[in-house]
Image (cartoon, helix red, strand yellow):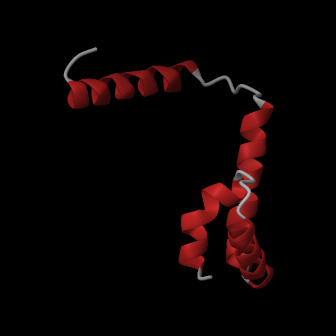
């Protein structure tokens, strides 16, 4: 399995899907590929943080700019609210 093939199947692997053949190939690849180990570990940590559900309070100015930007993009894409 190449790094590119690993990245294509990564979602199923990280989600813990029952994909015995792919998991065996992943395990073999990850055993010898530090960059892919880092990618998988980062994704797992991100998922764990997301599942923990600890909200982060955004600064008011940032939240206003984000909301305006999202509304602008929505109107640009869909033409209505």
The image shows residue 12, relative to residue 69, as above or below, that is below
**Residue 23, image quadrant:** bottom right
Please, which residue is most extreme toward the top here?
Answer: 81
* Residue under the image location 76 percent in, 75 percent down: 24
- Horizontal and vertical percent position of residue 47: 72, 45
Q: Tell me how many marks there are.
A: 0
**Residue 12, image quadrant:** bottom right
- Horizontal and vertical percent position of residue 58: 61, 25
**Along the line of sight, which residue is nearer the eye, 42 or 11?**
11
The image shows residue 48, relative to residue 20, as above or below, that is above
**Residue 72, image quadrant:** top left
In this rendering, position of residue 36 left or right of residue 49: left
**Along the line of sight, which residue is nearer the eye, 18 or 3?**
18
Quadrant containing the N terminus is: bottom right
* Residue under the image location 62 percent in, 56 percent down: 11
* Residue under the image location 71 percent in, 47 percent down: 46
- Horizontal and vertical percent position of residue 39: 67, 65
Quadrant containing the C terminus is: top left
The image shows residue 54, relative to residue 25, as above or below, that is above
The image shows residue 63, relative to residue 36, as above or below, that is above
**Along the line of sight, which residue is nearer the eye, 12 or 73?**
12
**Along the line of sight, which residue is nearer the eye, 7 or 72?**
7
- Horizontal and vertical percent position of residue 55: 71, 25
Please, which residue is most extreme toward the bottom here?
Answer: 32
* Residue under the image location 34 percent in, 22 percent down: 71
């Amino acid at each position: 399995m190449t790094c590119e093939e690993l990245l294509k199947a990564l979602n199923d692997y990280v989600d813990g899907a029952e994909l015995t053949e792919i998991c065996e190939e992943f395990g073999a690849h990850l055993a010898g590929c530090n960059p892919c180990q880092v990618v998988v570990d980062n994704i797992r940590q991100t998922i764990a943080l997301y599942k923990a559900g600890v909200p982060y309070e955004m600064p008011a100015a940032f939240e206003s700019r984000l909301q305006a930007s999202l509304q602008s993009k929505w109107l640009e894409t869909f033409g209505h609210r």
